[in-house]
């Protein structure tokens, strides 16, 4: 199966965490940049996704750009 290449944004139900998914390729390793940013890489080293954790007011402009980008936005409600 070929990984889907259409980028999309996945957000937590409360908008505090979001993930910019660039590919459906399987994650081979994750690189933790800091407490708020994790880069997921494929087997070939390419970046396949970026996770933004614990988003606060300082990150609202970035979230607004992602919301306005036209990328598919999938909001995930908290699991019980």
Image (cartoon, grey):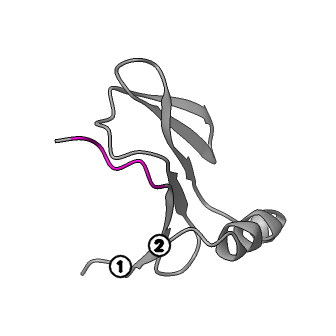
Residue 62 at x, y percent in the picture: 76, 63
Q: Secondary structure at mark 2?
A: strand
Q: How many marks?
A: 2
Which residue is drawn at the image coordinates 59% and 70% (left, top)?
16
For residue 50, what is the image quadrant?
top right
Task: Using the image as rendered, state which of residue 11 and residue 73 is in the foreground.
Answer: 73
Circle 2 crowding by C-alpha within 10 Å: few under 14, some 14–19, many from 20: some
Q: Is residue 60 left or right of residue 7?
A: right
Which residue is drawn at the image coordinates 82% and 68% (left, top)?
61
Q: Which mark is residue 12?
A: 2
Q: Which mark is residue 44?
A: none
Task: Using the image as rendered, state which of residue 52 and residue 66 is in the foreground.
Answer: 66
Residue 31 at x, y percent in the picture: 51, 28
Q: Is residue 13 above or below residue 63?
A: below
Residue of label 1: 78
| Measured Cα–Cα span from mark 2 to mark 1 | 7 Å
In this view, the residue farthest toward the top is: 44
Task: Using the image as rendered, state which of residue 4 and residue 34 is in the foreground.
Answer: 4
Q: Which residues are magenta?
A: 2-6
Q: In terms of sequence position, does the residue under pointer 2 or pointer 1 come before the other?
A: 2
Q: Is residue 18 left or right of residue 34?
A: left
Cβ atoms at labels 2 and 1 below 8 Å apart:
yes
Image quarter where the C terminus lies is bottom left
Which residue is drawn at the image coordinates 68% and 69% (left, top)?
69
Residue 68 at x, y percent in the picture: 71, 76
Q: Which secondary structure type mostly characterizes the magenta part of the structure? A: loop
Q: Is residue 77 above or below residue 10?
A: below
């Amino acid at each position: 199966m070929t990984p889907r290449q259409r980028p999309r944004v996945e957000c937590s139900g409360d908008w505090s965490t979001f993930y910019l998914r660039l590919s459906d390729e399987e994650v081979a390793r994750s690189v933790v940049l800091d407490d708020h940013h994790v880069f997921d890489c494929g087997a070939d080293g390419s970046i396949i996704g970026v996770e933004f954790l614990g988003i606060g007011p300082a990150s609202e402009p970035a979230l607004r750009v992602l919301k306005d980008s036209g990328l598919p936005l999938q909001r995930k409600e908290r699991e019980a």
